[in-house]
Amino acid sequence: MADTFNYRIDHHGSLVRPAELLAARATGEQEALREAEVTAVTEAVAYQRKLRSTVVTDGDLPREDFRSAVFDAVSGFRRTDETDADGLTRWVAEALPKANGPLLTDWAAQLADLTVIAPKASLPSPAYLAATTFQPGLGLSSARELGEALAEIIQAEIALLVSKGVRLIQLNNPLLLGQLAIDPVDPGALSFADALAVEALAVRLDERPESVRIGLCPGWTAPAAVDRARAERLYGDVPADRWVLPFDQGAEAELDLVRALPADRDMCLGVVDATVPELEDIDTVMARIDAVDEFKDIEDAALSPSRGFADVASRPLLSAEEQRKKIVLVETLARYVWGNEF
């Protein structure tokens, strides 16, 4: 796709929340919270511009976690008192979801007003939401039915975001890579085939500017070994333009994920580990990228951290300063690969 590609210094979308924002959210006072959110997003845009990112997000700062864009604006879900190992509150679907308004578009429009850098929006994928919120006996016939309803909502939001100037949309499904293992993880409520069908519904967009990319991140970590046929089916069944893939461990499975990627798709490689403060050795990372360049067109690539820095607002993976150093390292690596041609 090496045409007008220029979104090469990227990040997943979630950033460490400033203390002032967390404090405002804890009070529950809505007017003060809104003011704190606007201030935090404005400062985050300036922060990303200073770090020379080629895309700008709102950092998920106005949200509790990376799924909240949906749970905050879509009816049909009930919050429970349970949490998982990542600190994510469990929600269950009790009825077919219905959007009560835009999910991210209002914040995206503000981003477009704050900077000329391409705005980016990140959303949970419909298959991920369906797999994690479906519960038999609560009024829905299947996780596939739930996923298809969510896909329609997400697809409509993507079209609206593009109409407001957003040029990069990323859907996140942390479960999919587990289904590409030689011994795949049990898909639970949503089969692998159903997950692909649901994701495909969400990313379709017949008319959009040439510079728009709709991406999918299928997980934060590659499995120990990749089933090549399953990987090819993933890429073949889901027509996402851009695939955001883990590439921070130097594992053969990471290369296998890239090898299976069709030549007409962009790739964003998560080359630095967002879960540890230690900085990667530049020569080591460059050697990994050079290995990809032997069989893929590196002109169709971008670099990013391996995952979001704070997919749950209250549980950042790194400190704000450690996050800054990681993003600076991504920029440094991009300049080693492409010079200043962004």
Image: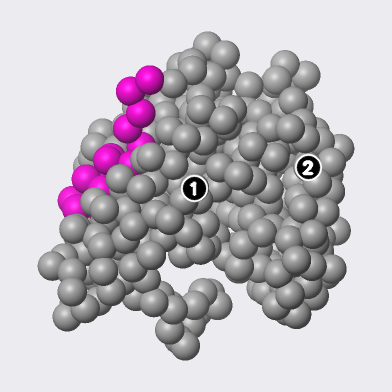
Give the quadrant of residue 145. Answer: bottom left
Looking at the rendered structure, the kind of residue marked 1 is: Pro
The region drawn magenta spans 193-207
Residue at 55%, 47% (x, y): give it. Answer: 104
Q: Which of marks 2 and 1 is nearer the N terminus?
A: 2
The residue tagged 1 is 102
Q: How far apart are labels 2 and 1 at the CA level?
A: 21 Å
Name the side, left or right, on which 241 lies relative to 282. Answer: left
Name the side, left or right, on which 270 lies relative to 42. Answer: left
Q: Is residue 188 magenta?
A: no
**x, y (%) of residue 233?**
23, 40
Mark 1 element type: loop
Q: Is residue 205 magenta?
A: yes
Q: Nearer the viewer, residue 4 or 138?
A: 138
Our reading of the magenta stretch's main secondary structure is helix
Residue 215 in sight in this render? no
Instruction: Single out the mark in the foreground, 2 or 1.
Output: 1
Q: Is 268 located above or below residue 339 in the figure?
A: below
**x, y (%) of residue 57?**
67, 43
Residue at 13%, 67% (x, y): give it. Answer: 141
Residue at 24%, 37% (x, y): give it. Answer: 237
Where's the C terminus, which quadrant? top right
Q: Is 177 located above or below residue 332 in the figure?
A: below
Q: Which of 283 and 206 is in front in this view?
A: 206
The residue tagged 2 is 45
**x, y (%) of residue 147?**
26, 56
Residue at 44%, 79% (x, y): give it. Answer: 79
